[in-house]
Amino acid sequence: MHSPNDTIDALDGKLIRLLSDEPRIGVLECSRRLQVARGTVQARLDRLQARGVIGGFGPQVDPAALGYPVTAFATLEISQGQGVDVRAHLASVPEVLELHTITGQGDMLVRIVARSNADLQRVIDSVVGFDGIVRASTAIALENPVPYRVLPLVEQAAKE
């Protein structure tokens, strides 16, 4: 758990933005562009990774480019005491991209993808075809005008 004092400063913010814009950039080039020592960049990166601010440097993969252009969100109601088993089941479904436990109308919110609207039925059947899932409500995403992003948050945190 991170304390409220775990903040980032302006240099951390610039480093994160640079790595977001150019994920294949090296530490030496970062230090040159940010006009700080290579050791400073490496220490900052190590600290940001250790704190969980930076979780990885892998490629961003677009499901649509892989042939899964349909995105939907399913709210699931699960049987009491079945959470662990349902989580394991959902983790085994390749089209499940995210799973969040939630408050409110359901117990879990799942982001899923499919090859088409017709294929979405197959994916939903695969998701809900488990004894621990009582009910599902699905909404198809029509467009994604604000894709997942954290850079505005990084910029805000770097100013505080």
Image (spheres, rainbow, N blue to C red):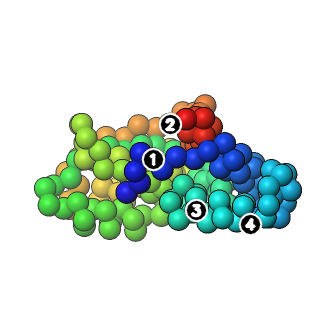
The CA span between labels 1 and 4 is 24 Å
Which residue is farthest left? 80
Residue 120 or 86: which is nearer the viewer?
86
The CA span between labels 4 and 2 is 44 Å
Q: Upstream in the sequence, badge 3 or badge 4?
A: 4
Q: Upstream in the sequence, badge 1 or badge 4?
A: 1
- The reply to whether dot 1 and dot 4 touch (C-beta < 8 Å) is no
Residue 124 or 2: which is nearer the viewer?
2
Secondary-structure class at tag 3: helix
The amino acid beneath tag 1 is Asn
Q: Give the residue at x 48% y 55%.
A: 97
Q: Upstream in the sequence, badge 4 or badge 2?
A: 4
Q: Give the residue at x 57% y 47%.
A: 8
What residue is shown with label 2? 141
What residue is shown with label 4? 39
Q: Upstream in the sequence, badge 1 or badge 2?
A: 1
Q: Position of residue 90 (x, y in %)?
A: 36, 62
Secondary-structure class at tag 1: loop
Q: Quadrant of residue 49?
A: bottom right
Q: Position of residue 99 (x, y in %)?
A: 39, 53
Position of 114 with respect to 124 (left or right) is right
User: What's the mark number on residue 84?
Assistant: none
The amino acid beneath tag 2 is Ala
What residue is shown with label 3? 47
Residue 96 or 128: which is nearer the viewer?
96
Q: Give the residue at x 80% y 50%.
A: 34
What residue is shown with label 1? 5
Binning the other alpha carbons within 10 Å of mark 4 as few (below 14), some (14 to 19) or many (20 upward) gives few
- The reply to whether dot 3 and dot 4 touch (C-beta < 8 Å) is no
